Image (spheres, rainbow, N blue to C red):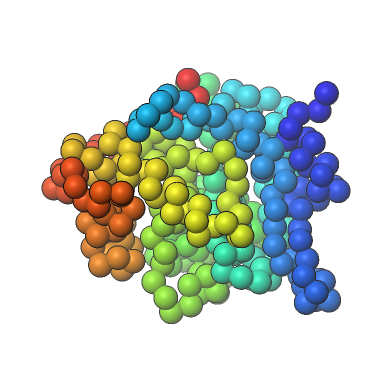
Amino acid sequence: MPTLAVMLTLLGCGDSLGVMRGPDATNLGMPSSLRYYAATGLLSEHVVGQGEGAGAHYGVQYSQLSLPEAADTLSVALEQLAGIDPLTLGTQQDQLAYWLNLYNLGVLDGVVRSLSAQPSFSSVANDGFMLFKMPMVRVGEHTLTLDQIEHGVLRGQETVPIAEWHTSLWGKDPVDARIHFAVNCASMGCPDLQPLPWQAATLDADLDRAGAAFVANPDKGAGPNGISELFDWFSEDFAAHAGSVEAFVSSFREDGGAGVDFDARIPYDWSLNAAR
């Protein structure tokens, strides 16, 4: 019996991205939207819910991802994304979903490789966060570091091979700070990796849901013990988006900033977000 990941890949008729083409895109040979079939199967099988209530989170079954079939599916998903020129994706939502998914799949691949080389690997903070600094994710003829995707392409704060990747995303607008709820650093303190890839059609609503889930979690997002250190690291992005960190956090909470100690910080937990 094939696994869900395999069946979803087959649904793509051999194309694990499931490229949907509109009339203009068909004529130009350009993809207009990506469905990420292989990534859908992979994430839905190996990203699982843990715990209950406000402290509930998703954990990753890294031991299962290391098995040959899942590892092959992950490789296929990354290879397919490497073959797409993101500048040909027609909308900002398509391009943003592409980069968010590429980053998250690259992190999974990096952790799996790290665990294979060192079974005791327990945190991406090991070796000075080297996992994010090594060239490992391909886009066409270029091989990027995870930092180049996050801080270069998405945030415009680091040099990347093609500067147009960043400007094509945002133009002259500020960075959408909700990206910080969408890129997952394989750590418990990070906003959860979602059990499905990001999709252009639902991206705006899904980013809002991810933000609301993070700041509703008092153990790592926001609450009486403070707010995540993440809001300090990227305060520039949050302030540009909403005027201030406090305004940004409050906008995602049902009761605004009530009950949140904005002067305190929740220490970031860099331990691996492995399913327990």
Q: Residue furthest right?
A: 13
**Residue under the point 61% across and 54% down:** 199
What is the number of callouts on the image?
Answer: 0
- In x, y percent, where is residue 60? 53, 30
- In x, y percent, where is residue 210? 44, 47
**Residue under the point 50% across and 24% down:** 275
Picture quadrant of residue 156? bottom left
Instruction: Using the rendered image of the protein, determine whether residue 147 is visible from the camera's viewpoint.
Output: no
Instruction: Using the rendered image of the protein, determine whether residue 18 is visible from the camera's viewpoint.
Output: yes
- In x, y percent, where is residue 255? 25, 49
The answer to which of 248 and 120 lies nearer the viewer is: 248
Position of 209 with respect to 26 (left or right) is left
Q: Is residue 34 above or below residue 74?
A: below
Q: Is residue 270 above or below residue 92?
A: above
The answer to which of 251 and 184 lies nearer the viewer is: 251
**Residue under the point 83% across and 76% down:** 27
Q: Quadrant of the N terminus?
A: top right
